[in-house]
Image (cartoon, grey):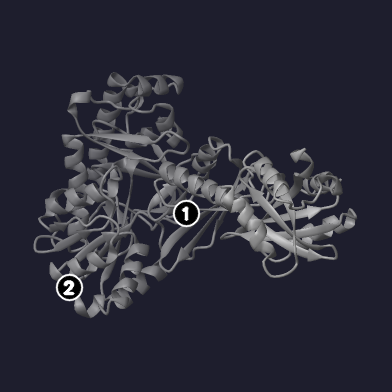
Amino acid sequence: MEKSYIVKQISIFSENRPGRLAAIAGALRDAKINIFAFSIAEANGFGVVRALVDRPEDAHRTLTDLGFRVSFTDVIGVKMRDEPGGLSEVASVLGDAGINIEYAYAYSGRDGAVLILRVDQVEDAVRQILDRGGELLKASLFR
Amino acid sequence: MAPWNRQVEEMPPDELRRLQYRLAKALVQRVYETSEFYRRRMKEHGVRPDDIRSLADIGKLPFMYKRDLRDNYPDGLFCAPKEELVRYHVSSGTTGKPTVVGYTRHDIENWSESLARGFSSCGLGRGDVLQVSYGYGLFTGGLGVHYGAEKVGATVLPTSVGNTERQIELMQDLHTTAIACTPSYLLHLGEVAEKMGVSIRDDTDLRIGILGAEPWSEQMRSRIEDWLGIRAYDIYGTSELSGPMFTECSEQKGIHIWGDLALAEVVDPETGEVLPPGERGELVITILQKEAFPMIRYRVGDITVMDEEPCACGRTHPRIHRIQGRVDDMLIVRGINVFPSQVEHALLEIPEVGRHFQIVVDRKGALDAMLVRVEVSEEAFSDKITDLMMIRKMVEHRLRSSLNVGVDVELVEPGTLPRFEGKSKKVVDRRSL
């Protein structure tokens, strides 16, 4: 049950120099893959581009074929109220349950705001959020 | 300053050659009798000690290469009983195995004698304070220079490497008159001194630099001399020959190779043919009196020119010109020899990164900085930045411990590093001398 809410994020290793994001985004455009959300984490000299896309398997294959270092990471997408306190509600649920957030990013679209989370105990997190009446993105959205 | 050992240093050239012949013949006879390695090597080459009937016959002997040291690690080339050894030094090899060199008391004595002559010929002696800013320890630089300087009666200040501000304070407080270090370190020291408000030229007694362990140029010499107000002399040697061993004299026109201690040849690196004086080629050295670790016709890998013209200083021993490069892909980073094959070897044992790499050497200020670019392997790629940072730190640590020199590591995208052999792509050297 919990598994149906675990979403495959693609993570791409990228050198920190001009044109690398354009190369990744261009490859996804050419493969007609839609990006729902993404973030860039940076370190000295390199970074990791993380993205939720509509066809993660295709995106993985496309980018790997082009020579990129790509991996899948299990994340969850929690729907938030797009008003003051929305993030606080979700964060409190996880904090109270002792679940640590490794990283997070968010987007706000037509259907409201979504917080994408990588946590240390992903199935636990799903259960806690559902038990508290929270709503999660379904993995079936990403095929 | 007067020669340290006038009788030897001003020996007529003919007499010197006769002495070299006698020493070479005795050396060949001795290693043939005592060393399995030399006996086998000479037999394979079809040459016996009796075949050495003139100095030129040395050319009949096979060459030795760095790989012979690796193949006979740790002590297969030693020719003296273990209990006669008084010291080891260890330097990096071309791959995983280091190079071990051993010395008898007599070997240390000759090494010091060689440097005592050199230091005297640069005007360094009793009453001087020599700050030795070469590394002490397994590296030959610190201890080698130290013993030579004590022999000429100079006062040694064994600062070793690093802690530059303290070095400058001691230089002022103890009235250092000479420093032995790499030329790039002296430039760095000059810059740090200026930041501290100290002028080496005006606020210290420094007058001589004994500089080596890395390539440098006449332009660099002028820069150092003009800026710091000192005389800068080239010093030459490698651990296989003992360590730093030969220096320029006050004429600054080439490095005297003491003929009673070493026989220098310059050969065509391709054919091995001995080249006449004045022609550029690879330096080949035979250490004539070494007991523990003789080297016979060792291909040093350094490119130079032999000069047998009489020197204005009056010393009759031949000179070699400033080293002009390498025949192989060896790099010298902060005075430490680095072979790209060592990097390759170290990376093979780190599954988190691929085996492809690129070395970029540059100068940060006056000092060398070495960067190794590697690709993260598929298995090790994590989307957590902290994991990737740990991989980078780990690779830096592993490379540092196998190369004995600090390295920065950069993680790059797969497939972006050169795939083909060849120095031109694997090594990018942006330093200008």
Viewer-side residue, A39 vs B6: A39
**Sequence order check, earlier mark of 1 and 2:** 2
| Residue B424 x %, y % | 61, 52
Viewer-side residue, B147 vs B290: B147
Viewer-side residue, B295 vs B173: B173
Q: Is B226 above or below relative to B303?
A: below
Q: Is B226 above or below relative to B289?
A: below
Q: How many marks?
A: 2
| Residue A79 x %, y % | 76, 57
Q: Amino acid at mark 2?
A: Asp
| Residue B432 x %, y % | 49, 65
Q: Amino acid at mark 1?
A: Gly
**Secondary structure type for disc 1:** strand
Q: Is residue B124 left or right of residue B29?
A: left
User: Which quarter of the picture shows residue A42?
Assistant: bottom right
Label 2: which residue? B205
Label 1: which residue? B325
Q: Chain of mark 1?
A: B
Residue A70 seen from this side: no
Q: Is residue B170 left or right of residue B363?
A: left
| Residue B131 x %, y % | 20, 60
Viewer-side residue, B357 vs A26: A26
